[in-house]
Amino acid sequence: MNKIYIGFDLGDGESITDFVSTNKTGEGMMTKFVDMQMPDSTVEGKAIPTVFGYDENEELVFANSILLMPDLVHDITINFKRRPCDLCRKMTVDRQAEVTSIFMNAHKFPSQKECPECYTTEMDKFIKSVVIFTNAVFEDKSYKDRIYGQSADCDEIVFCVGHPTRWSDLDVAIYKAILRESVLGKNQYEGKKASLIMAAESRAAFLTVKDKAEQRVLPKGTNALLIDVGSSTIDITALTTDSHNYQYNSGSNYLGVRSIDFIIKKMYLEELQKDSTEWEHYQDFQRNNPTYDESLTLACRKAKEEMYTVTKGLGMIRSHGLRELRIDKKSVEEYIKGCPIAKILLERISMPSEEQNKMGNKNWMQLFHDFLTEEKGRMSNKGIKIGRIILTGSASKMPFVPEIVKEVFSELANGGVLADMNPSRTISMGLALVGLSNDKSVEFQKDVNQLIDKELPDIIEKDLPKLADGLSNVIDMVVTGIVKDNMRQWRSGSICTLDGMTSKIKQDCSEVNLQKRLMGNKEYNNAISSWTVDTVGQDISLKLKEICKKYKVSDMAVGNLNVFQVPDIGNINVDVDVLDFADPLIAIVSVIAGIVTAIVLPTVLGIVIGLISWISVGLAVLLLDILLAIPGLGLAVLLGIAGIAVIKAAASGLSGAKEELLEKMQGMNLPQWVRDRVKDEKIDAKIKEAGIKEKIRRSILEEDSKKSIVKSVSESLRGQVEKRAESIKYEIESM
């Protein structure tokens, strides 16, 4: 199937799409990038402003057209991108989880009855703005013609839209539901089958700059750090150039540079206030034009862009016949330093109180410095060392942004901080690649599912005899230890009688106590852990190795594929939490221990009952035989202790006396010298006759028991196999 993948970076300040097509040839899958010309643009591969409004005929005007005729456009909408949860009414954590599920399962925006918290004035405005601008792009005739020209042989169009990395699952689910209200959610586009997927912007950036990071030789044991400074958010991603591609993702939902546009506007308005006539003119115009502030903000943004990208540090604010104001980098940056941004942002967007408190009275530069310092510390705590930084995003062109980066990462100041040559397309190109990479990994995922559903149970069943060997040894030792310990206590006199000893063995080997002993036994759990990691884990690794070979991931060592071992990645520091592997292993060992214990307990209890029967009778017979072998003395001692008169013994005969003796010996407090006659060899021989180990092994491998263990272990291991497969997918997707 031939597909095209359109990455849509709907930014707060500017937006752009990128296009990747695939074609199956005799030599395999061929891919190519296409530089797309955005609507209302004359240049291929150039972003357009994320802005729209209406002319005097109430016709939609958007992007660059507004910049050309701002005085003729009303109801201008800019900077409308928001974190969706900030627009909802407050929800409890449980309700958030419930609402997330509702949105994830919905094919359109849920009804007010399903989710009343999401029906706010702010959300309604956000929905309309996203849908209007998205439709303006993708329903533009010239844009559709360009798509049609590239998709003649295409079977399906995949739209991939990015979202900030720090957005929650609920944020993403709401955003996708909103996009489904646009042309992107109609399942068809220009007569072709169409689908919509979402991706974190950090992942998109990772796929775009991966090659750039690898083209530069990184210092040994270090990572490349991508810093994407956008209009509304900042995303950072630590990249590794090893085969596993583990990442560190983080960011800020509120620290984008749109606040600088608002600061420049504040600066401009303060200048107007110095002239009463100009200020009155502004106030009159504002009263008659409710969205004039949006137009003025746009004019300030344009002047900022001129100042940093077009002219030599100068920009001109022009707006609706009001006084023009020339701005320069030095004065603007000095003004930024004196402006706390929390108050400025709160006039435009909703922010959680914790974010407001965190910002305090600091300016943007201070907050950006603090943000980088904090993230640097977090990465350091995770063992991530940065050897190169790639700066991207529209704000990366402002000199003070790389200057602050170099100040925080002073060890990289000399050539270690690189500017992305095409920052506007970093996300959009990556989003197109995300769509492509997702499809590339579909077949891989099918093979993994086959491994999980079909081969994993067979692997566990094949390896089960080894588990049975290990556990039967431990259980044998535990039961034998209980019996021997109690017999030693009787022999030492700590337990007075044989009846007392058998009662104590019964108590120690009760179902509850035996279960506790086994579940808490270090050797028992180690046997399960060792089998899980070194036997089953190794066999799963070999299967994963075969899959890796199939998908040409040739440098994956078997040890790195073990689903319970932290990957050994040599000298490269990556964000791998040992607990990601340790905690599931502990849980799985506990599950296996529980089910195996439940299976073997009836067998063990039956063995114990047999042993107790021997102890209560056989040991008495053994003692009697030992004592009777002592000429004269033994019988006399026993009769005396038992209180059986010699005359009575003579009258009833020796056999009659023996029967009575065996019965009475159970409760006798025998003298120490008699107890000492019972040697370890005799005890060991009798216990060996019980065949504990083999009986337990058979009970584990009995058909019903085997099925139960295989099912339980398979279900427990599924998540771990999927987790390891995900790390392999990163490599497959980024090749």
Image: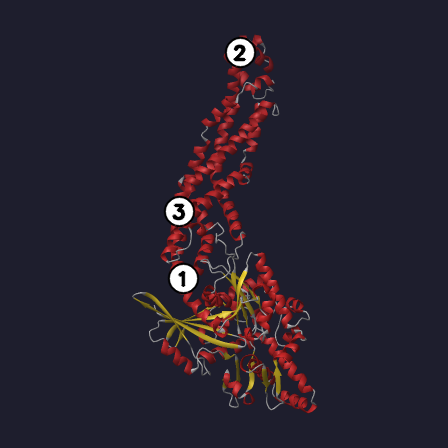
Callout 1, which amino acid?
Ser
Provide the secondary structure element on which disc 3 rests. helix
Which is more N-terminal, label 2 or label 3? Answer: 3
Q: Residue furthest front?
A: 414
Q: Looking at the picture, does residue 666 appear above or below residue 91?
A: above
Crowd rating for badge 1 (residues with CA inside 10 Å; few <14, some 14–19, many 20+): some
Could you say where residue 417 lies in the image, as x and y percent from the top left? Answer: 54, 67
The image's mark for residue 441 is 1
Q: Using the numbered discs, state the Cα–Cα distance from disc 1 to disc 3 in whole angstroms.
A: 24 Å
Q: Is residue 332 above or below residue 699?
A: below
In the figure, residue 70 lies in which quadrant? bottom right
Q: Which residue is under mark 3?
A: 459
- The type of residue carrying mark 2 is Ile
Instruction: Count every numbered label the image shows and give the total.
Output: 3
Give, as a three-letter code, the residue at label 3.
Answer: Ile
Task: In this rendered view, identify the residue nearer to me: 124 or 530.
Answer: 530
Q: CA distance from mark 3 to mark 2?
A: 60 Å
Residue pictured at 45% horizontal, 26% vertical: 689
> What number is the disc on residue 232?
none
